[in-house]
Image (spheres, rainbow, N blue to C red):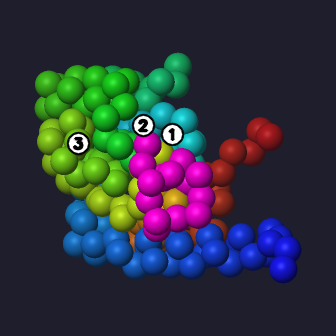
Amino acid sequence: MAVNVTHYNDEILKELVRSVNRIDEGQAEALVEGILRARRIFTAGAGRSGLILRAFAMRLMHMGLQASVVGEAVTPGIGKEDLLIIGSGSGETKSLVSMAVKATSIGASIALITTNPESAIGCSADLIVRIAAAAKEEADRASSTIQPMGSLYEQTALLLLDAVVLRLMDRLEIDATSMLGMHANLE
C-alpha cells in the first residue's frame, strides 16, 4: 500500500493530540497570568520557533496588548514589569540564552516554552510550559514522532499559544470582531 499525504496528515494529527494532551494546564494558566500581569510582552525564538512566537505576538497586539518581537527595528527596550516569552525546544540556543540573561539582569520576567525545562534558559525562567515532544536534536532518536527535527514541538507550541489567545480573549472579554479592528489595514 502506497503511503500518501492523507496518511501522513492522519499520523501528524495523532501525534499532535498526544502532545497537546500532555501540556500541564497549571503551566499554561501560569503563562496566561504572566501575560496579564505584564506591562509589555516581548517574544523571541530562532528559526521556526521564532516564526511561531511572531505569530503569537501579532495576536497579542490584536487584543490591544503591548507586544513586541525581539530583533525588530521598532522593538523598545525591556524593563522590570515586562515579560519575555521565549520559544526554544532545546532551551540552549545561544542567542536566546543571552537574551534571557540580559532580560533577567534588567529585572524582566522570563517565560519559556520548551521540551527541556532543565536547560540553561529553563534554569533562569520564572515560568515554564513544557511540551512533551522531541527537540530537533533528538527527533531522529525519538519514537514519539515520524516528523523530522523539531516539527512536533513547533506545531504543539503553535496550538498551545493559539489556546492561550483564546483564554486571554475570555479573560479580557474580547471577541474576534474587536480584534479585527486592530488588524493591519495597509496591506
Residue 60 image offset from top left, x and y in percent: 47, 53
Q: Nearer the viewer, residue 172 or 112?
A: 112
Look at the image and tell me whether residue 38 can be seen. no
Query: Of the residues shown, which amino acid type is indicated by label 2?
Result: Ala
Q: Secondary structure at mark 3?
A: loop
Asked whether residue 149 is drawn in magenta, I would say: yes
Which residue carries the number 1 mark?
Answer: 50
Q: Secondary structure at mark 1?
A: helix
Point out the stretch of residues depicted in magenta. 137-151
Which residue carries the number 3 mark?
Answer: 119
Distance in Å between CA atoms under marks 1 and 3: 18 Å
Q: Nearer the viewer, residue 174 or 52?
A: 52
Query: Of the residues shown, which amino acid type is indicated by label 1?
Result: Gly
Counting the numbered discs, the total is 3
Q: In the rendered image, which quarter contains the C terminus? A: top right
Majority secondary structure in the magenta region: loop
In this view, 128 is above or below 122: below
How crowded pointer 1 is (Cα within 10 Å; few <14, some 14-19, many 20+) is rated as some
Image-based side of 122 in relation to 32, left or right: left
Which residue carries the number 2 mark?
Answer: 44
Quarter occupied by residue 6: bottom right
Residue 78 image offset from top left, x and y in percent: 29, 28
